[in-house]
Amino acid sequence: MNPSLFTGKLVRLAGQDPEIDPERIARWNRDTEYGGFISVHPMQLEGPAKWRERLQGEVTDRHYHFSIHALDGDQPIGFESIFGTRNQHGDCWVGIGIGDRAYWGRGYGTDAMRLLLQFCFQELNKHRVSLAVLSNNTRAIRSYLKNGFVQEGVVRGSDHRFGLRQDVVVMGILRSEWQAAVT
Amino acid sequence: MNNSLLVGKLTRLVQIDPEPLGENYARWARDTEFMQLFDTEAPVPRDAKKTQEWLRKRMEKARPGDFGFVIYPLEDDRPIGVTGLWDAMNPNRDAWVSVGIGERELWGKRYGSDALDLTLGFAFRELNLHRVNLNTFEFNERAVRSYLRLGFQAEGEMRGAMRRYGRRYNLVYMGVLREEWYARHRDLLETA
């Protein structure tokens, strides 16, 4: 068992700060390559005030939001969330975004997801964790596979993004798969 | 008057009226077998008044793309179930669909299929959607058969995402594309 629940090899998780984080999130979302992958909704430019309101409202026992800090330099580089929790069925959904492009493709997101899965299984006692990703977000899919996610379905043409119909890939990881990978 | 958009072979779709629907829905909800086939949430008993209030609140909070319908059989004037399209006005041009027949003596008689096909017709003929999604439970074999018959394709299985009856079951994701639905309804395509 990892003695440190919220600190990995490259990143640590912190609570989101409604005072500090909104500026940064609003800035990340102006990067259309990032903004296009992060949500199924059309990209829009929302200022810090909107994000502040959102961050203040969403922390409950069914929603968890973390800020991802790089250990080198200790600055926030992205966020991750848990939502869609149904405790009676033991499942939840997760989402992640590395907003700071200097940290793309270098294992920071993978390390952050590893910590999030550890939190889901060790602390929240989940049976499985689900996520959805645009099929052309190959970098994200590679990262999820590395953490043990299995592709469970392809929702044909359910998203319209970057001017094209896109498939959405649904992935899941079971507790047993996670256990086998970490021991 | 040609009202074929909302009138099928066995059923017709009617606007939600919280009074009669609430009363009937509360009765259906006491049938826990129905609720276990219909909803991921645990079945809880509810009375007619609370259900009517809940329906009123839901109607107030409805987004422009939420269309809830009550299913009536052609032969008489009582609600037998519910269907609806949810989030149908988003720019991706897709929506979620749901259907449930609360009157158990009408199960397996294609009332649900007929009503769902009407809802799909509404989605593709009027709202011009690109696709319609649903999810259902591995153990609801009757529903899965009905969806396949209407042109849905199984697109994925979320392994063990449902815990019920003391074990785990898959959550089944299904989808039907506009052209797949029209392939079964060629008569509805206008030819120039």
Image (cartoon, helix red, strand yellow):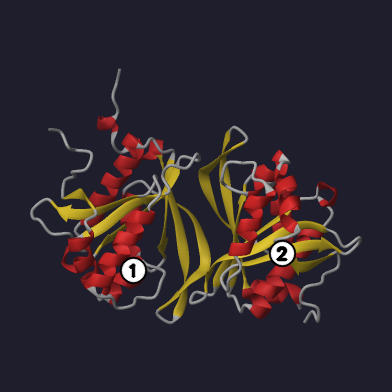
Compared to B66, does A20 lie above or below? below
Q: What element carries label 2?
A: loop
Residue B41 placement, left or right of B24: right
Q: How far apart are marks 2 and 1 (CA)?
A: 39 Å
Across and down, in percent, residue B48 comes to 22, 71
Judging by the rendered image, the residue that carries numbered circle 2 is A16
Judging by the rendered image, the residue that carries numbered circle 1 is B37
Instruction: Check the residue under mark 2 and report the chain it is in.
Output: A
Q: Give the residue type at disc 2.
A: Gln
Across and down, in percent, residue B122 comes to 30, 41
- Which residue is farthest right? A72
Q: In this orientation, which residue lies closer to the viewer: A154 or B98?
A: B98
Q: In this orientation, which residue lies closer to the viewer: A124 or B188?
A: A124
- Which residue is farthest left? B75
Q: Give the residue type at disc 1.
A: Leu
Quarter of image, res A148 = bottom right
Across and down, in percent, residue A157 comes to 52, 41
Instruction: Check the residue under mark 1 and report the chain it is in.
Output: B
Residue A130 placement, left or right of A116: left
Quadrant of the image containing the N terminus of chain A: bottom right
Frontmost of labels 2 and 1 is: 2
Across and down, in percent, residue B106 comes to 17, 63
Compared to B50, does A26 lie above or below? above
